[in-house]
């Protein structure tokens, strides 16, 4: 089942990223479902008018530099919360987050 990644805008400049798993092959179906998912969790649903933006399906390739499977379209690291290469889904410094959590990361020489 494909996993669609949908940007949903609702009153702010920053989109909410919603992952939608559907049997459908149509991006419009993923946009529709993402808008419904957003509206069901919106803190102000009566004023909410979500608008889905870009949609894509992750296409992963192995990246030897960090050892992770990385989406070629959005840089998502499959099944990781952060990576020592510096990636983090929040956009923060993944390497820094790992060291703050007490992870020991060996330096490459």
Image: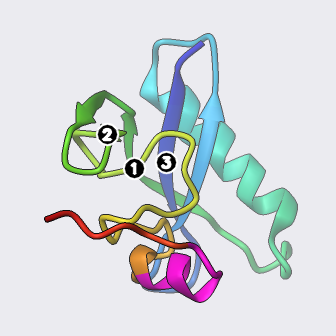
Label 3 environment density (alpha carbons within 10 Å; few <14, some 14–19, many ≥20): many
Tell me what residue is drawn at x 53 percent, y 19 percent: 2
Query: Disc 1 designates what residue?
Result: 76
Nearest-to-viewer mark from 3 and 1: 1
Point out the frontmost of discs 3 and 2. Answer: 2
The residue that label 3 is drawn on is: 6
**Which stretch did the figure color magenta?**
96-103
Q: Is residue 39 left or right of residue 51?
A: right
Left or right, 35 with respect to 15, comes to: right
Disc on the earlier residue, 3 or 2: 3
Q: Are marks 2 and 1 in contact (CB under 8 Å)?
A: yes
Q: Residues within 10 Å of mark 1 (few under 14, many from 20)?
A: many
Q: Secondary structure at mark 2?
A: strand
Q: Position of residue 46 (x, y in %)?
A: 85, 75
Is residue 99 one of those drawn in magenta? yes
In the image, residue 107 lies in the stretch drawn in magenta: no
- Quarter of the picture holding the N terminus: top right
Disc 3 secondary structure class: strand
Q: Residue furthest left?
A: 109
How packed is label 2: few (under 14 Cα within 10 Å), some, or many (20 or more)?
some
The total number of labels drawn is 3
Give the image location of residue 39, x and y in percent.
Answer: 78, 61
- The residue lying furthest to the front in this view is 109
Give the answer, above or below, for where 36 lies relative to 41: above
Q: Residue at x 57, y 13 (%)?
A: 24
* Residue 6 percent coordinates (x, y): 49, 48
- State how far apart marks 3 and 2 are (Cα): 14 Å
Residue labelled with disc 2? 71
Foreground pick, 102 / 57: 102
Q: Main secondary structure of the magenta part?
A: helix
Instruction: Check if mark 3's residue and mark 1's residue have beta carbons within 8 Å.
Output: no
The answer to which quarter of the image holds residue 96 is bottom left
């Amino acid at each position: 089942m494909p996993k669609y990644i949908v940007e949903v805008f609702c009153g702010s400049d920053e989109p909410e990223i919603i992952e939608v798993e559907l049997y459908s092959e149509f991006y419009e179906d993923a946009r529709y479902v993402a808008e419904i998912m957003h509206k069901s969790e919106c803190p102000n649903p009566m004023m909410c008018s979500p608008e889905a933006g870009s949609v894509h399906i992750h296409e992963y390739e192995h990246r030897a530099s960090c050892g992770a499977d990385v989406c070629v379209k959005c840089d998502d690291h499959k099944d990781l919360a952060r990576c020592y290469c510096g990636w983090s889904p929040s956009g923060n410094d993944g390497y820094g987050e790992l060291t703050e959590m007490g992870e020991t990361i060996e330096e490459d020489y």
